Amino acid sequence: MTTRPIVLFAAVASSLHLERARRTSELAFLALKEEGVELRGSPEPALEAEELLRVLSGQADVRVVFVASGGTSRLMSEALQGLEVVLWAHPGDNSLPSALSAREKLRASGGWRGEVAFSRPDSLPKGLRAEIKAARAARELRNMEILAICGREVAERLASSLEAVLGKGKPVMRQMSPARLTGLLKARAKQLSLSDAMAILKGITGEEATRELEEGLVKSVQMALLLEQEVSKLSSLPVVTFDCFSMIEELGLAPCVAVGLLLEHGITAVCEADPAALLLMTACRVLADAPAWMANLARFDREAGTITLAHCTACPSLAASWPYRGTFLPHFESGQPVA
């Protein structure tokens, strides 16, 4: 499935401004073409509500009505009842007053479902560019491939929740039990040393580290590296998620450090096989082109100006870029390593 969003373009004008409106609409149409979208519709301005409705009836991720001139608020208020559209107004030919008038008429009738954006016709408005970016992200989410470290029942529940949002058969999901993951870890020929693990987790320190914590840290790093290899086999947008408490029960290990390291390496990783968090964190990754991370607020100190986060999955390298200090310690709910 292509990640290019479908943008449907329609323009409106009054017969009084038609010749100039055609030239203005053509500029807007060409500006949209430059956005790398699948552009449908026509720059030819509609003069009647029926004509506008016909143009907007096609399938699209984003519908744009370019207000090429004034004298068009009535036809827009008749045609756009209940339609999600972006009204793109420009500085000339009474465009903005007409767009605002159409919006108020639609609001009065309860039919307003859009937004007004404003810019020169040869340059996309920020609001429209944001809509296109969000539509592209939504399409990318449908191309997700998920590696779920959990039992079959949890995987089925997760798949059902995601399918309800993304559509039937989406996303592709591969389930791996914690026991299977343990077997793969044991089968690895090369074992990491503690110094190797600490070098990989640059920026993370240990306070009063016990042997159990150190072993948990090494195992967490090995787990992250193994899962990174596994998701490299996936062809699309990879996401790893864990059923954290089943991992703690079956492996005696919390996945917090592994999640942070996967995020460090550009792989979206999500706690607790949570469908809402999975969608949100993956969307943030796509929209911002940077990993999103999560944590629980454990406490804050006004005088010291610090907050303490538990279950923190922040990337280790953040330590060098802002006042962040990561410490590995036992998982505070279970006492198991390593959080």
Image: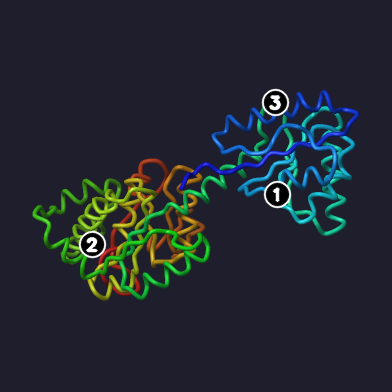
For disc 2, the marked residue is 208
Q: CA distance from mark 3 to mark 2?
A: 65 Å
Q: CA distance from mark 1 to mark 2?
A: 65 Å
Closer to us: 45 or 122: 45
- Classify residue 338 by image quadrant: bottom left
The quadrant of the picture occupied by the C terminus is bottom left
Name the residue type under label 2: Glu
For disc 1, the marked residue is 57
Query: Which residue occupies 16% across, 48% down?
Result: 196
Query: Which residue occupies 48% across, 60% down?
Result: 301
Point out the tag, 1 or 2, that comes first from the N-terminus: 1
Name the residue type under label 1: Ser
Closer to us: 185 or 194: 185
Nearer the observer: mark 3 or 1; the answer is 1
Point out the tag, 3 or 2, that comes first from the N-terminus: 3
For disc 3, the marked residue is 27
Residue located farthest toward the left when viewing the structure as drawn: 189
